[in-house]
Amino acid sequence: MDGFIGLVVILPLLFFAGWILKKSAMLYLGRDWSKGWVGLFWISVVFGLGLGVWFSGYAEWDAMRFRRLPIPIEYKHPKDGWIPLEFPVYIRSLALGTDFVIGLMLAMFPIAAAMRIAEFMDESRRIKSVRTNQDNPSSDETP
């Protein structure tokens, strides 16, 4: 039963993070971005890989006495030190993988959102320029 409860928490987080990463990659590949955007995108990827490794291997949440983020796998007992939480092996592995993917997603999300806003602004400007440059046909005139 513990495995099922773990899956109920882990799988939605994993699918959400995967969806954000997929949308980010599709946004990046779907357009010819300037060098500044390309550089920011790849810097966020590298930062996200580091954040993912830190989340799945080294992060400790001392205030709550948990190790690993955002899905804890160990608890710090005041007297006994770090005690692994009782999870089946597959849930533990899935939790560590999810922690890595969420770390990557958290670093890439801001730049992907900024790219989406920039794309929206470019499209808005393009539509506005098409409207202002277009002749306005009148129903009174006949060809």
Image (tube, rainbow, N blue to C red):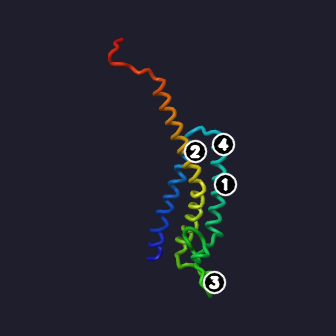
Sequence order check, earlier mark of 4 and 1: 4
- Label 2 and label 3: CA atoms lie apart by 45 Å
The amino acid type found where label 4 is placed reads: Gly
Q: Residue furthest bottom?
A: 79
- Label 4 and label 1: CA atoms lie apart by 16 Å
Sequence order check, earlier mark of 2 and 3: 2
Quarter of the image containing the C terminus?
top left
User: Which element carries disc 4, helix, strand or loop?
Assistant: helix
Crowding around mark 3 (Cα neighbors within 10 Å: few <14, some 14 to 19, many 20+) is: few
User: Which element carries disc 2, helix, strand or loop?
Assistant: helix
Sequence order check, earlier mark of 4 and 3: 4
- Label 4 and label 2: CA atoms lie apart by 12 Å
Q: Measured from the top left, where is residue 83 in percent x and y?
A: 59, 81
Dot 3 corresponds to which residue?
Answer: 81
Residue toward you, 122 or 103: 122
Q: Measured from the top left, where is residue 77 in percent x and y?
A: 59, 84
Dot 4 corresponds to which residue?
Answer: 36
* Residue at image coords 65%, 65%: 54
